[in-house]
């Protein structure tokens, strides 16, 4: 288990270190727990309310870990224009409860949607079969 | 040995470029990974001795090497999609390796910075003003004037912040620039720092762009000595669309909630940590090295129309046959872009609407396709250029649903600071739902006992439509920033041009 102090040390001397720290905590622990919020507040001389306010503002930070593999499906306008909404039911069925299928607004692949992201890999030109395969492979 | 060039841009990767590259390597070729030419329907696009093959998959490798592949498109640079463009910001697209300092220097890299250093700050600002460069993020504010304000502002510490939080659907030019030509952005920021007396710079990139983040970090490391004493750092966003708004972005950089700040004070006077700060979009800063080269400012100002000078990297997206990056001088018509260059819809059906400028941009019907790409012409037509994303919809699109989505998106992404945006967007979703169900239904919120002034009887459809107009006006003029302020654009334009899509449907949707 990585140490919170190590993360704080990594960002020592940085201007506005809260977001970089939260990214590292989310990455290391899979969430930013209330305990972590308390420790971060202490380390940065902020109130717990200030830290919690930031954590709860951004979509990327979660209060609880979710160990399931994550698939992000873009459902913004450009992907809608290319038919992503017709794929959603099949994607949800394929994901079931074992894959965390979430909506993202834009992966910047707008000329070649529908698009999805798994980890740091992106996928474009998805049809129903390709998307279902992608979700099944993510399990 | 055959040298094969394949892009490592995120879009090429998403279309399978790595597998194609591996197949060529396995066939004994030397594979060079370059930036993308921006012809997205051809990705993964393979280049051998200037000849293009695309879209290529690993099974095409043998035929491509034998010269018998049906994917051949001839000489890439002569392709009509590229030949019609005027590329300044994207002059290197497809031609160089993104992280090669050698390629960058060989294609005129750092010339702008060297000249800027020789000229001195005041003359640099003067050249940027003379070029007519306006902010490419959407607002279109003259970049040179902003720099002048920062340069003249008192303060020992000053910052250059690059807004790379490209969250608008239908836009990807920032991403392509950061992944394909990161040194050009760094050079532009170094020039801005020199001109304004800034010591530090931040590039705020959205977390949805992992490849861009990796490329920028590597490029900053490689060029550290070249831009010193200016020091640069990448900061990663955390999934909040509103952080593309400059004051919200500054709050986020400071480690706060990404809430919008009231203006004034302008960020140019009191920006990051209260210090004078240049906040410019990726494309604005990336246009600067070209402008600062010998004669660059005059050449830039000679392009375009009216007060929209220079070139705009336009992004053709959505349901379009030939999607990708099309950089050209301002003044090109929307119809030319969509029908001639983009080849109409990918589905082959008629074009119903295009949304220009992202989720906050108006839906434009084909009847207005003579509209020239120009900030003022778009504003006069109640539309915006924004970041120049053009998203095409075919006739299967339900514009009533798209209007509802605009409100829904605003509700999901509102920072919550101002009431018109935070509450208006949610009420807007409910109202559009009632209208689409045929009207004449009671408003459950209006029926609450504490809503003393709301009518208790159900409104008619006409009254609901009038209420939607009122709501849009309140959001447009009462919101703190463009998120709430521009959400009415897609809603009103959809209502104006496709009122039939707001009528009650017989079944479903």
Image (cartoon, coloured by chain):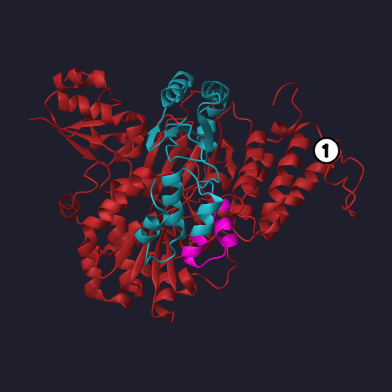
Q: Give the magenta-colored segment's residue range.
A: A40-58
Instruction: Please tell me the colour of chain A.
Output: cyan
**Seen from this angle, which residue lies furthest left?**
B1
Q: Who is closer to the viewer here, B407 or A53? A: A53
The answer, for residue B294, to whether it is visible in the render is: no
Q: In the figure, B288 relative to B444: above or below?
A: below
User: To which residue does mark 1 refer?
Assistant: B461
In reply to whether residue B124 is colored magenta, the answer given is: no
Chain identifier, colour red: B
| Percent of width and height locating residue B424 | 71, 50
Q: Main secondary structure of the magenta part?
A: helix
- What residue do we see at 28% from left, 22% from top? B57
Residue at the spot 46% in from the left edge and 25% down from the top edge: A135
Could one spot residue B295 in this view of the protein?
yes
Residue at x-position 31% and y-position 35%: B80
Which residue appears at 44% of the width and 25% of the height? A139
Determine crowd level at label 1: few under 14, some 14-19, many 20+ residues with C-alpha closer than 10 A: some
Residue A36 higher or lower than B341, as above or below: below
């Amino acid at each position: 288990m990585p140490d919170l102090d190590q993360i704080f040390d990594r960002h020592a001397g940085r201007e506005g270190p809260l977001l970089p720290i939260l990214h590292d905590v989310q990455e290391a622990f899979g969430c930013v727990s209330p305990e972590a919020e308390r420790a971060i507040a202490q380390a940065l001389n902020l109130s717990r309310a200030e830290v919690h306010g930031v954590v709860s503002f951004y979509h990327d930070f979660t209060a609880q870990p979710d160990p399931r593999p994550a698939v992000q499906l873009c459902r913004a306008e450009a992907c809608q224009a290319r038919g992503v909404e017709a794929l959603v039911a099949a994607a949800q069925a394929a994901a079931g409860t074992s894959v965390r299928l979430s909506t993202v607004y834009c992966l910047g692949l707008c000329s070649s949607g529908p698009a999805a992201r798994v980890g740091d890999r992106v996928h474009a030109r998805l049809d129903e079969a390709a998307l279902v395969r992608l979700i099944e492979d993510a399990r | 040995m055959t040298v094969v060039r394949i892009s490592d841009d995120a879009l090429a990767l998403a279309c399978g470029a790595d597998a194609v590259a591996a197949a060529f390597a396995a066939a004994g070729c030397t594979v060079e990974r370059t930036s993308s030419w921006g012809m997205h329907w051809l990705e993964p696009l393979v280049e051998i001795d200037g000849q293009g093959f695309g879209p290529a998959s690993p099974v095409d490798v043998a035929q491509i090497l034998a010269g018998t592949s049906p994917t051949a498109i001839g000489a890439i640079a002569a392709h009509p999609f590229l030949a019609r463009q005027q590329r300044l910001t994207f002059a290197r697209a497809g031609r160089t390796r993104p992280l090669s300092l050698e390629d960058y220097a060989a294609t005129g890299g750092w010339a702008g910075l060297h000249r800027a250093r020789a000229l001195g700050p005041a003359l640099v600002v003067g050249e940027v003003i003379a070029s007519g460069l306006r902010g490419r993020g959407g607002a279109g504010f003259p970049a040179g004037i902003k720099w002048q304000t920062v340069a003249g502002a008192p303060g020992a510490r000053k910052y250059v912040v690059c807004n790379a939080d490209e969250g608008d659907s239908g836009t990807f030019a920032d991403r392509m620039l950061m992944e394909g030509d990161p040194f050009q952005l760094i050079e532009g920021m170094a020039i801005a720092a020199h001109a304004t007396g800034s010591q530090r710079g931040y590039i705020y990139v959205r977390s949805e762009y992992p490849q861009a983040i990796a490329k920028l970090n590597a490029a900053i490391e490689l060029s550290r000595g070249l831009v010193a004493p200016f020091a640069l750092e990448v900061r990663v966003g955390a999934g909040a669309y509103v952080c593309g708004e400059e004051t919200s972005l500054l709050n986020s950089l400071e480690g706060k909630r990404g809430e919008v700040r009231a203006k004034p004070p302008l960020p140019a006077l009191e920006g990051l940590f209260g210090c004078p700060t240049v906040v410019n979009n990726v494309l604005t800063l990336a246009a600067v090295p070209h402008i600062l080269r010998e004669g660059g400012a005059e050449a830039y100002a000679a392009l375009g129309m009216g007060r929209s000078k220079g070139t705009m990297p336009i992004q053709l997206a959505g349901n379009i046959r030939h999607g990708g990056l099309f950089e050209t001088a301002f003044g090109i018509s929307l119809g030319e872009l969509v029908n001639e260059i983009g080849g109409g819809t990918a589905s082959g059906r008629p074009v119903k609407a295009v949304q220009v400028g992202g989720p906050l941009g108006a839906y434009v019907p084909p009847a207005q396709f003579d509209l020239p790409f120009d900030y003022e012409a778009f504003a006069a037509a109640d539309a915006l250029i924004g970041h120049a994303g053009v998203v095409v919809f075919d006739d299967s699109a339900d514009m009533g649903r798209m209007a509802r989505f605009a409100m829904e998106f605003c509700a999901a992404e509102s920072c919550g600071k101002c009431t018109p945006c935070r509450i208006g967007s949610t009420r807007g979703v409910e109202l559009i739902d009632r209208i689409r169900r045929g009207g004449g239904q009671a408003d459950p919120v209006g029926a609450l006992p504490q809503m003393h002034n709301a009518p208790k009887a159900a409104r008619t459809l006409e009254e609901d439509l009038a209420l939607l107009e009122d709501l849009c006006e309140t959001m447009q003029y009462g919101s703190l920033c463009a998120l709430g302020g521009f959400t009415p654009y897609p809603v009103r334009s959809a209502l104006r041009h496709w009122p039939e899509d707001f009528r009650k449907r017989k079944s479903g949707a």
